[in-house]
Image (cartoon, rainbow, N blue to C red):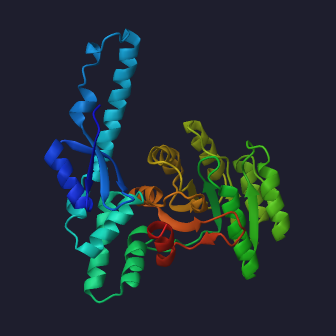
Amino acid sequence: MRLRRFIGLDMPAALRHVKEALGHEAVILQTRACPEGGIEITAAVDADLVTTPLAARDGAAGDDLVAMTRELSELAARVRELDRAVRPSTAAIAGLGAEARALAERLALQGLAAGLAGTIGASFERARSEGAAAGAALEVSLACHLAPSTPAEARVIAFVGPTGAGKTTTIAKLAARHVGGGRTHVGLVMADTQRVGAREQLGAYARLLGVPMQIARDGRELRAVLAAFADRDAVYVDTAGLGGDPADAGALERLLAGAGEPVARTAVVSAGASEVALRAAWRQLGRLGAATCVITKLDEGASLGTACTWLHEQRLALAWLSTGQRVPEDLAVPSGSALVRWLVAA
């Protein structure tokens, strides 16, 4: 595989260099802002990825050739996927005015899909043409496309997602907000009987907040717990982390189906999760019928762009942003100003 790097004053200029050197079949592997200014693009051609004559390489063993061929085929498939995501940038971003184009390029560099970045840039440009100040236009454009509505909160919500995404801490933050407001009676349910210390962690939060917590090992127990919590305005269910085994989602779905009343499902994912990891997670989360999402661990320096692209593709409503470990302070509503802080200014 032959990789080449191209530098331009801005994204359209760098893309022109790629097209001139490699033609329309070029695929973009990476873009980044150069410290000295400008944009650097790393690109290749599909033919370089899939037709390199491995057999001609001296000393290559048969098994090595098979393994390398397989790896290159997988890489080629991944590159084509990236290509489909990045190529819209030529039309979606290059056609914008200077101010909107700079915004769209910034969003793309933060991990947002080029097509979505261009759409947000176009919304920003329209708002500016109608007389909106830059800050207001930016906030409205981001909120419109990434958090278009505030999802209604159901009485019973199960928080579902990969192991270590931050489900328990998110539940503690939400419960603390309700208790602190004095308007809501909260109940907590621990349905994770697998993770060592899970019960103790949620129980510690429950004692600190002065709210009841009960355990549900299956659908029958969950139904009984919810009946006991009939006087609670909000009930949050902590669930076992989802791994790569499809049986995990199946077992959790059976538990939630036995609740005896509607249970909303909110996905919890880390901002640091890769695109591949998020797509794998959706194979389970989609089966569970997740409709809303909490993005966590923004304090760990991860870009919000990849996760926002993913939730936009899956049509998930962004409910909350978890920005640190403090309970309940580090939980933010995904307002326009919050999105500017964590996506544009990060």
Residue 155, how many percent across, how many down? 65, 69
Question: Residue at the spot x=72%, y=54% of the render?
Answer: 222
Quadrant of the image occupied by residue 137:
bottom left
Quadrant of the image occupied by residue 54:
top left
Question: Residue at the spot x=57%, y=66% of the render?
Answer: 321
Residue 241 visible (yes or no)? yes
Question: Residue at the spot x=22%, y=54% of the render?
Answer: 15
Q: Nearer the viewer, residue 213 or 100?
A: 100
Q: Nearer the viewer, residue 62 or 248?
A: 62
Vertical side of 83 occupied by 259: above or below: below
Residue 230 visible (yes or no)? no
Vertical side of 78 occupied by 205: above or below: below
Indicate left or right for 161 with 276 as reference: right
Question: Residue at the spot x=73%, y=61% of the render?
Answer: 226
Residue 160, how many percent across, how many down? 60, 53
How many marks are shown on the rendered structure?
0
Residue 187, how many percent across, how many down? 76, 66
Q: Nearer the viewer, residue 26 or 139?
A: 26
Indicate left or right for 16 with 30 as reference: left
Quadrant of the image occupied by residue 148:
bottom left
Location of the N terminus (image quadrant): top left
Residue 294, how many percent across, how many down? 56, 62
Q: Residue furthest bottom?
A: 131
